[in-house]
Amino acid sequence: MAKEAKKEAEKIDAAAAAKPKEAKKEKKSQKEKPKSKKKHAKVQVWKLYDVKDGKAVRKREKCPRCGPGVFLAAFKKRKYCGKCGWALWQHG
């Protein structure tokens, strides 16, 4: 029985040697990854106000939590404050 087990082990080793070794994917280090080319754009203030009768009028709403210095972002179904996270959902 020992001889049979030895022959089986040799067959398995021979089959493993016959198979080509699979190439492992090497992980790229943090330095090799391409960096993002898009830079942070400054706020275009002239798009947030309108001039009527010589006065600046806001185009967007102010945040109820943060006050008059912070604008709400307007999306299709919600208004959102990027500073405090306040959101108002509009149903329908």
Image (spheres, rainbow, N blue to C red):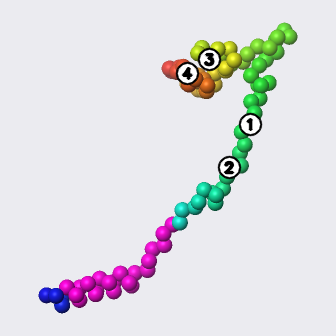
The amino acid type found where label 4 is placed reads Trp
Labels 4 & 3 near each other (Cβ < 8 A)? yes
Q: Name the residue under label 4.
A: 86
Q: Which of marks 3 and 1 is in front?
A: 3
Graded by Cα atoms within 10 Å as few (under 14), some (14 to 19) or many (20 or more), the crowding at tag 3 reads few
The residue at 16%/88% (across/down) is 2
* Position in image of residue 52 (x %, y %): 82, 12
For the residue labelled by badge 3, is the local secondary structure a helix, a strand or a loop? Answer: loop
Residue at disc 2, secondary structure? loop
Q: Is residue 23 covered in magenta?
A: yes
Label 3, on which residue?
66
Amino acid type shown at disc 2? Ser
**N-terminal of the two: label 2 or label 4?**
2
Q: In this view, does 78 lie above or below 2?
A: above
Expressed as whole percent of the image width and height from the top left, the position of residue 84 reads: 58, 23
What residue sits right under mark 1 in the picture? 41
Label 1 – label 2 distance at C-alpha: 14 Å
In the rendered image, residue 63, in percent from the top left (x then y), is placed at 62, 17
Q: Where is residue 68 in the image (x, y as percent from the top left)?
A: 68, 14
Left or right of residue 12: residue 30: right
Kind of residue at disc 1: Ala
Which residue is identified by label 2? 36
* Front residue of 70 and 89: 70
Amino acid type assigned to the residue bearing label 3 in the image: Cys
Q: Nearer the viewer, residue 30 or 49?
A: 30
Estimate the spatial distance between the alpha carbons at disc 4 and disc 3, rounded to whole Å. Answer: 9 Å
Quarter that holds the N terminus: bottom left
